[in-house]
Image: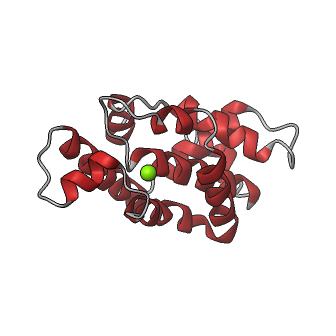
Amino acid sequence: MNGIEKWLERRGVVIDDIAEIVLALQHPYNADLTVEECRLSVLAVLDKREVQYVLYTGIALDELAERKLLPEPLQSIMEKDESLYGVDETLALGITNVYGMIGLTSFGYLDKMKPGIIRHLNVKGERIHVFLDDLVAGLAAAASARIAHGDPKAIQYHLPDSP
Ligand code: MG
């Protein structure tokens, strides 16, 4: 498990949670797709340094807010998860944009429907997931777009014999 997977897991998100969403997004277009192929696509997206940087930034802000370490007014905005804040969605687009327009459409859909782990993260409790719900939606949208674009490495990636 690499660094970014550990960060996600620390925040309650495992790769399979994201792969399930990718499968649901792609299933209408590709009935033969497996959850393992979706998992590999998520890992391929996570392998990109610009994606990792977005995740580190958003997750760090969530964690700093939980520890009440952010300066005002940001601390209060994060605690309330103010709907006009919008920086969480903007940051997540940094992940989705890597795979173009299809990713953007899926991101909008996931943001509205909040399936699976995204809905779970959205429930207000002790923890603050202002950024993480959008980051997970961005990851799922990007991994889905990657499959839609038919990138052959979507399947080959991370197999033991790949170069
Ligand atoms: Mg959010």
Quick check: 68 left or right of 57? left
Q: Residue at x 37, y 42 (%)?
A: 129
Quick check: 124 left or right of 74? right
Whether residue 135 is visible here, answered yes or no, is yes
Q: Residue at x 37, y 63 (%)?
A: 85
Quick check: 71 left or right of 32? left
Where is residue 84? Give x, y as percent: 41, 64
111 or 51, nearer to the observer: 111
Q: Quadrant of residue 117?
A: top right
123 or 109, nearer to the observer: 123
**Vertical comparison of 26 with 88: above or below:** above
Q: Residue at x 47, y 45 (%)?
A: 133
45 or 122, nearer to the observer: 122
Where is residue 87? Give x, y as percent: 38, 64
Where is residue 94? Give x, y as percent: 46, 65
Colouring scheme, one of rainbow, by chain, secondary structure, one colour: secondary structure
Where is residue 105? Give x, y as percent: 68, 64
